[in-house]
Amino acid sequence: MAPLIAVQNLSKSFPGVRALSHVQFDLLPGEVHALMGENGAGKSTLMKILAGVYRKDSGEILYNGEPIHFESPREAQAVGIGIIHQELHLMNHLTVAQNIFIGREPRGRMGILLDEDKLNRQARQLLDHMRLNLDPRTVVGGLTVAKQQMVEIAKALSFNSRVLIMDEPTAALNNAEIAELFKMIRELKARGVGIVYISHKMDELKQISDRVTILRDGEYVATVPTASTSVDAIIGMMVGRKLEEVVRTHASGHDGELALEVRNLNCGPLCKDVSFSLRRGEILGFAGLMGAGRTEVARAIFGADKLESGEIVVSGKPARIKTPSDAVAAGIGYLSEDRKRFGLATGMDVESNVVMANMANFLAFRFILKQQKIRATVNSFIKLLNIRTPSATQEVRLLSGGNQQKIVVAKWLARDCDILFFDEPTRGIDIGAKSEIYKLLRSLADQGKAIVMISSELPEILRMSDRIVVMCEGRITGELSPHDATQERIMQLATQRETSKAA
Amino acid sequence: MAQSESTTVAGSRMVAARARFFGPSARQKLLAFASLIVLLVFFSIASPDFMQVDNIIGIFQATAVNGVLAIACTFVIITGGIDLSVGTLMTFCAVMAGVFLTYWHLPMWTGVLAAMATGALSGGISGTLTAKMKIPPFIATLGMMMLLKGLSLVVSGTKPIYFSDTENFPVISQDSLIGLVFPGLPIPNAVLILFVLSVLSSLVLNRTALGRYTFALGSNEEAARLSGVNVDRWKIIIYALGGAICGIAGLIIASRLNSAQPALGQGYELDAIAAVVIGGTSLSGGTGTVLGTIIGAFIMSVLTNGLRIMSVAQEWQVVVTGVIIILAVYADIIRRKRT
């Protein structure tokens, strides 16, 4: 069978980064071909080049045997390569039909007015063809994420796409919705559509994909048939090198000193009756599935969202935390999972960000910035955390994800908080920077800081935590010591819904 | 290797230090500054009357009020907000100065401070509307703009208030402190106020916590809040500071006219915003400089003055100004795309 897409020797660089280096890839009709690799391995870059979002530097892409060279996603779409981005790109206020045919609306007789009936009819046909029970006149904003995704797929198919690229399509879906999506994918396969599937979830790949191509650090590793390859083998190829082991030194000297106690915290549907305690020198892992409410708990304690009820005790004293600035005053720091939105002013320089939480310490007459002191402090953090930046006045947006994360860390170290919440501290950063962050967390704990680490990566939780709290649907469903914690045990607690718990 | 790396790091530090001195949008300011020079050269060649001391001083004087208002706007715009009330607030402060001095016979400097306090209070209200009540700044200050316009008319009984009882009031803007020190340079005090204010504002923006938070709000307000910054309070303070600066503009214009004209003021806010934008401050917030704003204000008054000297009809002057604003912002967009 001739491949739909054949990629050879593809390379792509961004300023300072070699994102892809001599990568090969091919896609057969009616095949689901998974792309695997850690963050920064080059999956997204490859996919975006295929879809015409980025332009390649060198190499060859054949589509149906013809070399292609896209200038824009529009061109890729026109020849039949569609992409479903992780973040959906729909206009929430328009209807399903209007979204599907945006930019290609059928016109009425005069060519001026839009023919809404024809539009809905065409959309109806398309949805029927996909066996989707959805009214084309529904406003998209009111649909579930899963349904919205189906609309995206319908939109891609309306171009008669022969290739469909899906970037972590299940990230926001529940199990029933995933089953629905997989049904759709099998349907498409049967029609000869080739699907490039990106996901981090191994079990999904096993279910849905035919072949897996593994990338690592922008380079091609291997392409293997899914059915005959073990999950361990795939992970082995993804990671490649052995990670530097962080020696688990369980905190001893600080045992007994309670840093934080949270009792019966309630804040919205994803933080229900949460109680836990945290000791100095300890790393408390918060495990759970995405959307289990771990971030919500952290935000509630930090005063970012309004508490409904509950008690927060810091170092034995009840704390009244209504705003983040109260929390900071009480010695609590929160490192958000979404650095760019909640953690950094990326348009500002390194030093402005580092002193953001602790400006009062750098003021003369409570007003004028002490430039020298700021510069000295920031430079010492740059050295301490090994932040790779040309200078303290470099704009943060120009730095890599790992270095940006270190700047957020530096911000809270500069504030000298006793209690630190790390929300997905290693998300989106490369392996090297990851192990540096691990070392940093451990050394902070050793210095007597109390640390909560929220993470969706089980190996990370198991390796770093002195104690593990597991959440599901806004409740704490269990607490484990590192000795009796296993991935299976955590997953069991993470999926323990309220009904099954009561039974 | 390590050697060369450390030299490049040192080199980039120097570049960074230089960028810091000129401010973050140094290049845009260079662009604005170059446009200003081009305009000056063009008008000098076009008309022999342009490069005369009197005319230049006239340009300076014409820039004073718009420049001061534009500085007020610069702070607010850097936070990612907008203040449409600066023009009518200026007038309201002038009217209140009339009330304080002419009706209540307060001592001159008390009246002056009270007028500025009026501005700060009004700015503080705008800030509270945005920060606490979450009304978008455009709407909040649009409301304040109309409210203040009406109040000026109400308070003054729609008639000008003259400062006939306060003999020294015209001194504020019309006399020349510089002329006293350097005879032959009769630059009026209004211009002196503009320059002192720009230097102070520039220092506040770049060297104080208030300035740092101004940029932080415009750059990423949520990140600032989650860093423990009391963003609401700082926003109110920044709007209040802008209001106080409008009070200064009100005093300058009242002193120049030796009266408070209650019908004046609307339209000034757009000139001020135009100066800010020409000066390279982004309306989406996070970047901007006072120096750029001042250059922007000068570009606008040089244009008006030069076109008038060339006997271009007034209606065409307005057309040209519109074109210049669009060109200036477009140039900025092109520059941003390239970097």
Image: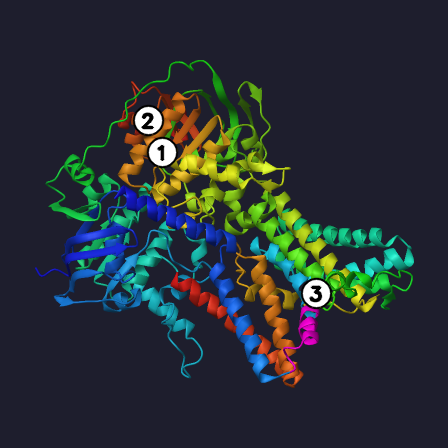
Q: Is residue A304 left or right of residue B62?
A: left
Tag 1 residue: A455
**Amino acid bearing label 3:** Val
Q: How many marks?
A: 3
Disc 3 + disc 1, Cβ < 8 Å = no
Foreground pick, A255 / B255 = B255
Quick one: label 2, few (<14), some, or many (20+) residues within 10 Å? Answer: many
Foreground pick, B98 / A484 = B98
In the rendered structure, which disc, 1 or 2, sits on the residue that comes first in sequence? 1
Tag 2 residue: A464
Disc 2 + disc 3, Cβ < 8 Å = no
Location of residue A130 with respect to A340 vertically, above or below: below
Name the residue at 49% across, 64% down. Answer: B30
**Does the magenta stretch mainly form a helix, a strand or a loop?**
helix
On the question of residue A344 being in view, the answer is: yes
Label 3 resides on the chain identified as B
The secondary element bearing badge 2 is classed as: helix
Disc 1 + disc 2, Cβ < 8 Å = yes
Q: Quadrant of residue A443?
A: top left
